[in-house]
Image (spheres, rainbow, N blue to C red):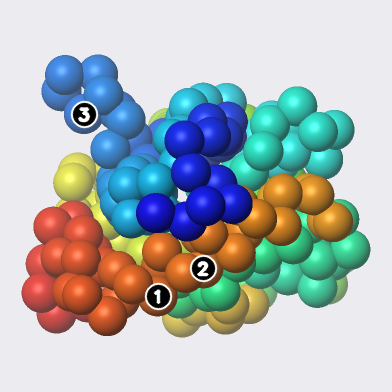
C-alpha cells in the first residue's frame, strides 16, 4: 500500500460511452480498459475510487472546477490541456481518424467541401476538425457522446465524423455501420489527469501503480481482454 493515498476515496470522472475504454456492459456495470486499469491501480496502491460516468466534456469541466479528483476517459495528453491539468505517464497510443458511412464514396478531406461533419464536444477530434474546417470548407455539428455522433453519420445528416482510432476500430468491429477512410492524425497518448497542482499524491500513486501493472503483466492482460493479443 502507498501510505499517501491508502484508504482514501477519490472521485474519478469518465466518459459515458467510449468503448473499449469505458462502457456499460450487459449487467449495466462500467467496464473497459480505463476502468479496469483504474481499479487495478487503486487495488495495487490501496486507494478507493468512486467512478462517475459524466460524459467526456462534463468530466473535464468537473475536474477543472475541482468537483472531482481525476479523469480517466481516453483523454489525450495535449500541450493545451497541460496548462490546466497534470497528466500521468502515457498509458495508450491513439490518433484521430475520419469515418464515413459504409456505402459512402468520401475518402478524403477535400470531399468534405460544403458538407456537415459530426464531432464530439471538447475532444481532440473536434479541435482537429475545427482547425481544418476553413481550409476544407465543411461545417461541424457537435454531440456530447460518441454514439450520437456516429448515428448522425449513419443516418446521413453528416458525411463524416472524427474519432479516436482505437475507439472507432473497436466500434466498427462491434457493429457500428461506419468505415475508417484516413490514417490517424494528431497522434498522441492517453493519460490520467488531475487538476494542475492538486492531487499530486494521487497522480504519483497512479504512475507507480501503472508501472507495477506493466511489470507484472496485468496491463497486458487488461488490454488483451478488450483488444485481443495483437494490440
Ligand atoms: N482522446 C480524445 C480527447 O482527449 C477523445 C476522448 C473521449 O472522447 N473520451 O479529446
Quarter residue 162 falls in: bottom right
The CA span between labels 2 and 1 is 6 Å
Where is residue 78? Give x, y as percent: 73, 70
In the rendered image, residue 217, in percent from the top left (x then y), is placed at 18, 74
Q: Quadrant of residue 154?
A: top left
| 19 relative to 190 in the view: left or right | left
Dot 1 crowding, Cα within 10 Å, few <14, some 14–19, many 20+: some
Compute the Cα span from label 3 to label 1: 27 Å
Residue 28 showing in the rendered view: yes
Of the pair 164 and 110, the residue shown nearer to us: 164
Secondary structure of the residue carrying tag 1 is helix
Q: Which residue is mark 3?
A: 25
Residue found 47% across the figure and 56% down from its top: 2
Quadrant in the picture for residue 220: bottom left
User: Exactly how many numbered labels are in the figure?
Assistant: 3
Disc with the residue nearer the chain's start (3 vs 1):
3
Q: Residue at x 84, y 56 (%)?
A: 197
Whether residues under marks 2 and 1 lie with C-beta atoms below 8 angstroms apart, the answer is yes
Q: Secondary structure at mark 2?
A: helix
Q: Is residue 161 left or right of residue 82?
A: left
Question: Looking at the image, is 197 positioned above or below residue 79?
Answer: above
Q: Which residue is mark 1?
A: 211
Which residue is denoted by mark 2 in the rendering? 207
Tell me where residue 62 appears, x and y as whole percent: 74, 31
122 vs 202, nearest the viewer: 202
- Mark 3 or 1, which is nearer the eye? 1
Badge 3 marks a residue whose secondary structure is loop
Q: Quadrant of the N terminus?
A: bottom left
Q: Which callout, 3 or 2, points at the residue further toward the start of the chain?
A: 3
Residue visible at 21% across and 29% down in the picture = 25
Amino acid at each position: 500500500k502507498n501510505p499517501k493515498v491508502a484508504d482514501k476515496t477519490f472521485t474519478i470522472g469518465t466518459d459515458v460511452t467510449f468503448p473499449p475504454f469505458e462502457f456499460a456492459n450487459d449487467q449495466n456495470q462500467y467496464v473497459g480498459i480505463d476502468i479496469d486499469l483504474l481499479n487495478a491501480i487503486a487495488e495495487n496502491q490501496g486507494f478507493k475510487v468512486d467512478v462517475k460516468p459524466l460524459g467526456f466534456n462534463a468530466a473535464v469541466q468537473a475536474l477543472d472546477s475541482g468537483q472531482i479528483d481525476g479523469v480517466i476517459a481516453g483523454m489525450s495528453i495535449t500541450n493545451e490541456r497541460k496548462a490546466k491539468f497534470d497528466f500521468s505517464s502515457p498509458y495508450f497510443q491513439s490518433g484521430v481518424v475520419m469515418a464515413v458511412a459504409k456505402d459512402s464514396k468520401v475518402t478524403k478531406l477535400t470531399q468534405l467541401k460544403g458538407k456537415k461533419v459530426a464531432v464530439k464536444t471538447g475532444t481532440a477530434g473536434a479541435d482537429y476538425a475545427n482547425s481544418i474546417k476553413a481550409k476544407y470548407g465543411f461545417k461541424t455539428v457537435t454531440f456530447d457522446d460518441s454514439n450520437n455522433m456516429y448515428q448522425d453519420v449513419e443516418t446521413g445528416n453528416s458525411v463524416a465524423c472524427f474519432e479516436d482510432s482505437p475507439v472507432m476500430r473497436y466500434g466498427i468491429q462491434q457493429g457500428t455501420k461506419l468505415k475508417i477512410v484516413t490514417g490517424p492524425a494528431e497522434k498522441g497518448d492517453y493519460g490520467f489527469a488531475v487538476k494542475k497542482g492538486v492531487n499530486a499524491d494521487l497522480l504519483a500513486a497512479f504512475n507507480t501503480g501503472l508501472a507495477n501493472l506493466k511489470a507484472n503483466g496485468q496491463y497486458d492482460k487488461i488490454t488483451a481482454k478488450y483488444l485481443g493479443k495483437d494490440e
